[in-house]
């Protein structure tokens, strides 16, 4: 029996069904709702796309910190899909907590000091966003700055993992999606560029969550 078959047998049909559901919802969100105004259906589809990943994680028995990160991401998706500053702050808080959960998992995996070149590039990008984008957030400038620090900690922890490319790719895609989201919300004027940014955010964000889950489902050989 091939290793490919063994991997699928170890995951099981319930996990595969949840992963398929997550992928369908993610594609639906990308095509129909990424740049659409708030609605109950958008909230359900957007939240479900990551909640199904969390369900797959539970069914597969992945580490609790990974499930927590996914659940917090789903909660953040729900809040960000609703209108208003209070919902935005709740979504930002949920995602920040999710990043801390992922950082905790990376540390538990043995994250050490990240390589200087990628770490320096990530820090420069994050601190540049803090200096340029955060002031454009108005009253939200302080929460945005704190959020950037949290995601920097998560990405640096991922970069400190030797031989863990899925975690690293997921963390970097997550950071890229958040930077584009900040541009969409605080910099870009209404119009085609903002709509394109909204699609780019989702096209990076959901795969980031899926990559982090995949890293837990298929850990590197010892």
Image: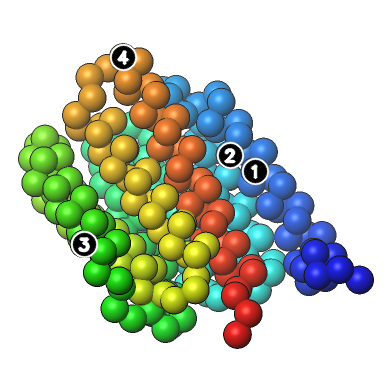
Q: 35 and 82: which one is in front?
A: 35
Q: For the residues labelled 2 and 1, say whether their Cβ atoms are less than 8 Å apart.
A: yes
Classify the position of the C terminus by image quarter.
Answer: bottom right
Q: Please, what secondary structure does the residue beneath circle 3 have?
A: helix
> Measured from the top left, where is residue 140 in percent x and y?
15, 43
What residue sits right under mark 1 in the picture? 23
Considering only order in the chain, which callout, 1 or 4, is on the residue closer to the N terminus? 1
Q: Which residue is mark 2?
A: 26
Question: How much space separates mark 2 and mark 1, taking CA atoms?
Answer: 5 Å
Tell me whether circle 4 and circle 1 mark residues in contact (CB < 8 Å).
no
User: Please, what secondary structure does the residue beneath circle 4 have?
Assistant: loop
Of the two numbered discs 3 and 1 in the rendering, the one whose residue sits closer to the viewer:
3
Q: Which residue is mark 3?
A: 120
Q: Position of residue 107 (x, y in %)?
A: 38, 79
Q: Earlier in the sequence, mark 2 or mark 4?
A: 2
Q: Quadrant of the N terminus?
A: bottom right
Is 41 located above or below residue 9 in the figure? above
**Precedes in sequence: disc 3 or disc 1:** 1
């Amino acid at each position: 029996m091939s290793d490919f078959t063994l991997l699928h047998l170890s995951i099981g049909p319930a996990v595969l069904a949840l992963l398929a559901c997550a992928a369908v919802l993610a594609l639906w969100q990308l095509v129909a709702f990424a740049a659409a105004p708030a609605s109950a259906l958008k909230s359900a589809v957007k939240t479900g796309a990551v909640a199904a990943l969390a369900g797959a994680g539970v069914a597969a028995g992945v580490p609790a910190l990974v499930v927590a990160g996914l659940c917090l991401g789903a909660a953040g998706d729900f809040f960000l899909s609703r209108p208003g500053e209070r919902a935005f702050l709740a979504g930002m808080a949920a995602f920040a907590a999710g990043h801390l959960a992922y950082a905790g998992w990376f540390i538990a995996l043995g994250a050490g000091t990240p390589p200087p070149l990628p770490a320096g590039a990530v820090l420069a990008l994050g601190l540049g966003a803090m200096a340029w984008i955060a002031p454009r957030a108005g009253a939200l400038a302080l929460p945005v700055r704190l959020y950037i620090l949290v995601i920097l900690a998560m990405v640096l922890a991922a970069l400190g993992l030797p031989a863990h490319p899925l975690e690293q790719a997921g963390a970097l895609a997550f950071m890229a999606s958040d930077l584009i989201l900040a541009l969409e919300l605080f910099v870009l004027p209404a119009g085609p560029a903002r709509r394109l940014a909204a699609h780019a955010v989702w096209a990076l964000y959901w795969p980031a969550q899926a990559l982090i889950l995949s890293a837990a489902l298929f850990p590197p050989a010892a």
